[in-house]
Amino acid sequence: MNIYFKLFSIAFLLFAIPIGSTFAQAELMPWGDLNGIRVKGQLLDFSTRLNVVGEGGWLDVKFSGKELQKPKFRRDGDVQTVSTEIGGIIFTEIVTDLKPGLVDVVIKCESKVDTNLTGVFFGVKWSKVKYSGKNVFDIKPKDSGISKNTEDKNYERLFLPIHMGFFRKGIVYEKSFQISVNGEIDSEPVEISLDASVKGRPFAGVGGNFRLQNALTDPQVIDYCLANMKVAWGRVEMPWREWHRTLENDPTAEAGNGKLDAHVKKSMQMAQRLSKLGMPVIVSAWSPPAWAILGKPNNRPTPEGVWGNPLNQDRMQQIYKSITDYLLYLKSNYGTEATYFSFNESDLGINVRQTAQEHANLIKGLGFYLQSKGLKTKLLLGDNSDANTYEFIYPALNDAACRPYIGAISFHSWRGWETETLKKWANAAKQINAELLVGEGSIDAAAWQYPAYFEEESYALEEINLYTRLLAICEPLSILQWQLTADYSPLTGGGIFGDKGPLKPTRRFFQLKQLGDTGSGQRHILVQSSRDDISVAALAGTETGYTIHIVNNSAGREAKLTGLPPGIMRFKVFVTDRTRNLKSLPNIEARNGQAIFKLDPRCYLTLVAE
C-alpha cells in the first residue's frame, strides 16, 4: 500500500475534478482528526492531529482530540468541515473527497490575540510495522515537514507547519494538502464459527432512555420510536430536585394538593406509558435537592475537573424516605412500580457523586428501606459513566449483605470498549448471578455538540459495531439506547437540532430496529469471527431458532458460517447499510451445518433461521 502526501501553498488551486457523488471516503472525526481514507469500504489507515506548540517548544503541546475541545462539524456533499479552538488558536479544517483514494485538506487558523508560538502543525502518524519496506509517503517539498523521534518505535510521525513564530490577531494563516492512498484491497473470506452447545444469559431486546429534556421535539421522536420499534426496557428520570426542593416540605402531601411539579408529572407519565406497554422501567435520579448534598449544587465540573456533589451522610434516612416516597407515589398514582432505581453515573458525579463504598452502603440502606415499605424495586449496581470504572462496583459486588437488594448490574458504553475491560462486567454479572444491562448505549458523550455527526456513516457503523461486540462479550439482557427522544435522536427533521425538514428515521434508527426486531427472547451463544474488522454476535431459542448479527467494517468478501445445527436449512436475511434500510434479501441456504454467502462492504447483516 502506498500513501502519498503532497504539500501546497495557500495559493494552491484545486484541480478541476467534478464533485457530483458523495464518496464519504475520508474518515474525519468531528474534532478534526483523520483516521484514514476508505477505498471500497476498507480503511487505509493513518492518523492526523491539529497541534499548537507553545513558545517554550515541544514540551508544551495542545492538540485536537475526542472530548478535549468543543468543536462543530458539518457535511455538505463531499465536503466535511470542522471548526474548533485549541490553545487560543481558532481552526477551520475543510476535507474534500476528490475521487476514490484522493482527498484535499485545507487548514485555516488564526489567533485570538497577538502571540508567539513555536508553531501550528498538521501532525501525521503512520505504522512502520504495517508499511515496513514500502514507499509510504512522498512529501513535496521534502523539507516542509518536521520529523520527530519518539519512544514509540512502531510509528513514524511528521509535523507539517501551517504557520510558525508570531501570530498576529485577526490574520488567517492557511495551508492546503492533498492526501492520496492506493493499495490492494483485502477481500479475503471470513469464517464465522458458531458453538451452540452452551446457551448463555437471555437477551430481551433493545431498550431506550426516555429522559425528557426537549418539550417541543421529544414527543414526536418518542411516539415514532414506540410505534415503529420493539422496545424491551425503558429508563426514565426521577426529577428529585423538583420533587422535594426543601427538607421541611412533604412532597407527597404537596402532590396530593395539586402542587406536583410539571416536570415530575411528565416524567411519571413517561414511566407509566412505558409500563403499560409491558416494559420493565428503571428510574434514575440526576439532580439532587440542595438539602441532600454537601456543598453548592454542581452540575458542571470544577476547574479541577470534579463533577457533582456527595450526599450528606447525616441525612441518609431522609434521603431514603424522599426517594421511596417518590416511588410509592409513582406506584399508587400512576400504576407503575419501578423495577430498578439508580443514581445516574455516581462514579463520576452526574450529578450525585459517590465513593465505591458509599455506593455499596446506599444499596444496603436504600434497598432495605424500599423493601420495608412494600416496594419490589431493587437497586442497580453501578450504572457507571463508562466501562472503565469497573472497580467502583467491587465493594458491593463482594459484600453479601448487598446482594438481596441488587436487581442487576449496569454500565454505560461511552468509553472502555477493550475486550478485557468488557469481560470484567460479564464476569461480575456471573459472580453474583445477576443480569447485566447497558444502561446507556452509544459511542460519543459529546456528540450533542456536533449533531451532524449522528448522520455520518462512521458514527452509525461504529455504534452498531459496538452493540454487536457488547452482545458477544457481555451477554447483556438489554442495551438501552441513549436516547429514544430528540436528544441524540435516531430521527432527523421536525426541528430536532434546528433541522426544519420532515421527520424521518436515520440509518441509526433502522440499525436499532434491526437489532431489536430480531433475536429478542433468545439466549446468547458463542460465536467467533476470523477477522477483527468483522464483529459477530449470536442468539438461540429453539433448536432451529437462531439469529446471527454481523457487522462488516471493511471491504466486501465471501463469508462462511459453520457450526450450524442440522435442523437449520435456510436463513432470512436483513441488511442495513449506506443505501439500504432494514432491507430483506434473498434467503441463504444452509447445508451440512454451514452456509456460504456474500458480505457487502460496511454493512450490518442479520441472519434469522427459518
Image: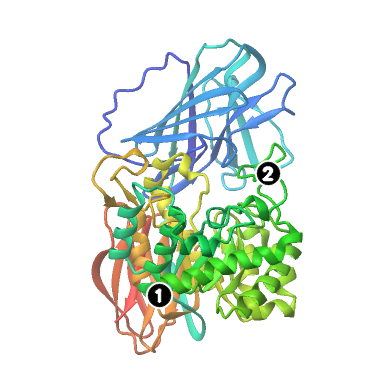
Amino acid beneath label 2: Lys
Residue 380 seen in the current view = yes
Quarter of the figure that contains the C terminus: bottom left
Residue at horizontal 60 percent and vertical 20 percent from the top: 143
For this rendering, which residue is in front, 141 or 593? 593
Residue 189 seen in the current view = no
Q: Is residue 196 left or right of residue 40?
A: right
In this rendering, is residue 119 above or below 341? above
Residue at horizontal 74 percent and vertical 29 percent from the top: 59
Residue at horizontal 53 percent and vertical 33 percent from the top: 137
- Which residue is identified by label 2? 296
Q: Tag 1, which secondary structure? A: strand
For this rendering, which residue is in front, 512 or 229? 229
- Nearer-N-terminus badge (1/2): 2
Camera-nearest label, 1 or 2: 2
Amino acid beneath label 1: Leu
Mark 2, other Cα within 10 Å: few <14 / some 14–19 / many ≥20: few
Q: How is the image coloured?
A: rainbow
Mark 1, other Cα within 10 Å: few <14 / some 14–19 / many ≥20: many
- Percent across and percent down for residue 606 are 35, 69
* Image quadrant where residue 375 sits: bottom right
Q: Is residue 425 left or right of residue 242?
A: right
Q: Tag 2, which secondary structure? A: loop
- Which residue is identified by label 1? 561
In this rendering, is residue 285 above or below 336? above
- Percent across and percent down for residue 441 are 49, 59
How far apart are the two marked residues, 1 and 2, measured between alpha carbons?
58 Å
- Percent across and percent down for residue 567 are 34, 89
